[in-house]
């Protein structure tokens, strides 16, 4: 029973992800910021979809942060520093199918507070 619920939740997230990705794209000066959230940590990437390369990335596991709101704020601050070093001031936020609530919302707000326009 539980496996069916988990499979359904994942299926719905993937469907939301595909709908979102059909509408947004990033380039070198205006990259797409993609978020992945596991039960333990967060991962963020700035992606240039035209060249299909990752411009910058942050790994919550390496920074020692958990997948909660405080951890999201810390990883977003470090990621914003990396983006500013590469002279990236604005980006498109790809929530990767996750609902814009809690940790994902805290991450986006922290990026905005640190000078990245989403």
Image: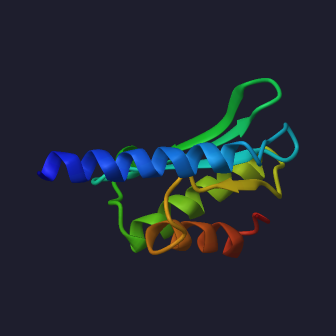
Image location (x, y in percent) of residue 40: 28, 53
Numbered label tally: 0
- Answer yes or no: is residue 59 visible: no
Left or right of 58 on screen, residue 25: right
Left or right of 11 on screen, residue 47: right
Say which residue appears at 32% left-offset and 60% top-offset: 66
Quadrant the C terminus occupies: bottom right
Residue extending farthest to the right is: 29
Residue extending farthest to the left is: 1
- Choose between 54 and 85: the one closer to the eye: 54
Quadrant in the picture for residue 90: bottom right
Image location (x, y in percent) of residue 27: 84, 38
Image location (x, y in percent) of residue 91: 78, 54
Say which residue appears at 80% left-offset and 24% top-offset: 51
The image shows residue 118, relative to residue 83, as above or below, that is below
- Choose between 70 and 13: the one closer to the eye: 13
Say which residue appears at 52% left-offset and 46% top-offset: 15
Looking at the picture, the colour scheme in use is: rainbow
Left or right of 118 on screen, residue 5: left
The image shows residue 118, relative to residue 92, as above or below, that is below
Say which residue appears at 75% left-offset and 63% top-offset: 116
The image shows residue 9, relative to residue 112, as above or below, that is above
Left or right of 59 on screen, residue 64: left
The image shows residue 19, relative to residue 76, as above or below, that is above
Image location (x, y in percent) of residue 43: 47, 47
- Answer yes or no: is residue 28 visible: yes
């Amino acid at each position: 029973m539980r496996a069916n619920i988990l499979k359904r939740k994942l299926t719905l997230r993937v469907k939301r992800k595909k709908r979102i990705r059909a509408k947004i794209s990033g380039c070198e000066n205006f990259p797409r910021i993609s978020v992945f959230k596991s039960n333990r940590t967060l991962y963020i990437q700035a992606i240039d979809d035209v060249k299909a390369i990752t411009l910058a990335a942050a790994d919550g596991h390496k920074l020692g942060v958990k997948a909660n709101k405080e951890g999201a704020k810390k990883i977003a601050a470090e990621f914003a520093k990396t983006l500013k070093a590469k002279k990236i001031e604005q980006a498109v936020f790809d929530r990767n199918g996750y609902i814009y609530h809690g940790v994902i919302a805290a991450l986006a707000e922290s990026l905005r507070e640190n000078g990245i326009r989403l």
